[in-house]
Image: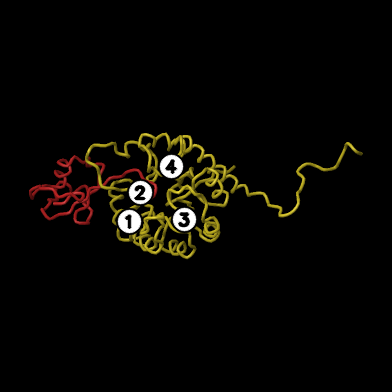
Chain colours: A yellow, B red
C-alpha cells in the first residue's frame, strides 16, 4: 500500500485525527494524544492566569502541531484579534476560525467566517474555518485562501453524530480542499462513516472528554478513523438494491 | 490601568516586562495586547505603561470548540 499522507497548510501529517484539548484534565492530554495518534491538537486563547496553575503547554508532547481556535469571537474583527494573539504566543501560524453569535446551538456565523478567512490568509495564517456545511460558503472560503473547510456534523459538544451527512457529502464532492469534519461527532462509528465518505480528517473533543475512559476512547477513535480512511481508499463494495448474490458457489454437489 | 479587566493602581513608568513579573505571569507563556495592539516580546523591556492603558495578557488553555 502506498503511503497515505495528509497535506495541510503545506505540512505533511500521517494522522487524520485532530484532537481537541478542552473539557478534560491537562494531565490526561499526553495519554490522549498518544492513544489518538494525533499530530494536531486544538487550543483556545484566554486571559492568562497568574496563579501559577499548570500551563497546558507543559502537557502537550513535543512535535504536535498546535491549532489555536478563535473561540469567543463574535465577529471577524474579534477572530482576527484572537488569531494574532495566538500567533504571538509563538506556536506557528495555523488558526481555526470559530465565530459564533448564537450561544444556544453554538452555530458558526458563515458570513463573518468568510470575512475573517480573507483577512487572516492575507496575514499569512494557515486558515482552517469551522463552518456550517453550506456549499456557497465553502466556495467563498476556497476563494479566500483557506487551507481546508471544517463543516460541523452536529452542534458542538452534542455528541449527536452526523446530522448534516448529506451536506457534508456535497462539500466532499464539490470542494477541492480537505474537508475536516468537526463538532458533534460522538462515536467512533460516526468518525469512521465520515472517513468512508471521503472526509480528509475528523476533529473530536467532547466525544473523548466525556467518555468513561479518555485515553481508551482516543484509541477507539484512532482505529475508527484509520478504518474509515482505508475503506475509502480501497473503494467500498457496491450496494445491491434488490435480491442477494452468493459469495460462495451455489452449484450443488451433494445432489448431483 | 486595567489588566485583564481588573483596575490596577500601578504608577506610571512601569514597563510591560515589570508588569508581567509583578502580576506573576510567565513571560514565555503569554502574549500581551496594549490598547488592542499586540506588544512584540522584544518590546517588553522598552514599552512603558500609562495609567489609562488597557492591557490584556493571554495564554493557551484547553479547547476544542467554543
Labels 1 & 4 near each other (Cβ < 8 A): no
Q: Please tell me if label 3 and label 2 are on a single chain.
A: yes
3D distance between C-alphas at marks 2 and 1: 13 Å
Structural distance between the alpha carbons of marks 1 and 4: 25 Å
Residue identified by numbered label 4? A39
Q: Which residue occupies 48% across, 43% down?
A: A15
Residue positioned 22% across, 38% down in the render: A51
Relative placement, left or right, of A225 versus B17 is right
| Residue A10: x %, y % from top left | 43, 51
**Secondary element at tag 3:** strand
Side of B44 where A225 appears, left or right: right
Q: Which chain carries label 3?
A: A
Q: Reading the chain from its start, which is encountered first: label 3 or label 2?
A: 2
CA gap, disc 3 and disc 1: 18 Å
Give the letter of the chain under mark 1.
A
Q: Residue A151 carries which label?
A: 3
* Residue positioned most to the right: A256
Residue marked by disc 2: A68
Amino acid at each position: 500500500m502506498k503511503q497515505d499522507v495528509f497535506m495541510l497548510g503545506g505540512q505533511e501529517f500521517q494522522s487524520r485525527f485532530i484532537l481537541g484539548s478542552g473539557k478534560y484534565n491537562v494531565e490526561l492530554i499526553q495519554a490522549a494524544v498518544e492513544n489518538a495518534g494525533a499530530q494536531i491538537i486544538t487550543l483556545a486563547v484566554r486571559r492568562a492566569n497568574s496563579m501559577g496553575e499548570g500551563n497546558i503547554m507543559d502537557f502537550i508532547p513535543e512535535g504536535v502541531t498546535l491549532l489555536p481556535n478563535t473561540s469567543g469571537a463574535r465577529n471577524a474583527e474579534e477572530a482576527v484579534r484572537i488569531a494574532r494573539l495566538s500567533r504571538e504566543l509563538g506556536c506557528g501560524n495555523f488558526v481555526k476560525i470559530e465565530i459564533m453569535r448564537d450561544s444556544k446551538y453554538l452555530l458558526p456565523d458563515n458570513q463573518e467566517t468568510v470575512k475573517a478567512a480573507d483577512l487572516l490568509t492575507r496575514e499569512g495564517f494557515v486558515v482552517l474555518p469551522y463552518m456550517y456545511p453550506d456549499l456557497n460558503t465553502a466556495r467563498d472560503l476556497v476563494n479566500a485562501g483557506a487551507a481546508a473547510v471544517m463543516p460541523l456534523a452536529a452542534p458542538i459538544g452534542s455528541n449527536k453524530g452526523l446530522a448534516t451527512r448529506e451536506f457534508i457529502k456535497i462539500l466532499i464532492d464539490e470542494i477541492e480542499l480537505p474537508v475536516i469534519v468537526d463538532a458533534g461527532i460522538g462515536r467512533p462509528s460516526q468518525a469512521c462513516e465520515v472517513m468512508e465518505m471521503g472526509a480528509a480528517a475528523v476533529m473530536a473533543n467532547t466525544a473523548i472528554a466525556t467518555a468513561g475512559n479518555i485515553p481508551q476512547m482516543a484509541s477507539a477513535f484512532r482505529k475508527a478513523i484509520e478504518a474509515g480512511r482505508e475503506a475509502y481508499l480501497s473503494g467500498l463494495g457496491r450496494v445491491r438494491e434488490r435480491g442477494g448474490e452468493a459469495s460462495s458457489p451455489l452449484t450443488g454437489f451433494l445432489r448431483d | 490601568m486595567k489588566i485583564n479587566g481588573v483596575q490596577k493602581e500601578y504608577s506610571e513608568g512601569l514597563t510591560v516586562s515589570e508588569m508581567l513579573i509583578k502580576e506573576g505571569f510567565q513571560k514565555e507563556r503569554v502574549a500581551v495586547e496594549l490598547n488592542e495592539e499586540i506588544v512584540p516580546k522584544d518590546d517588553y523591556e522598552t514599552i512603558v505603561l500609562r495609567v489609562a492603558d488597557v492591557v490584556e495578557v493571554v495564554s493557551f488553555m484547553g479547547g476544542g470548540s467554543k
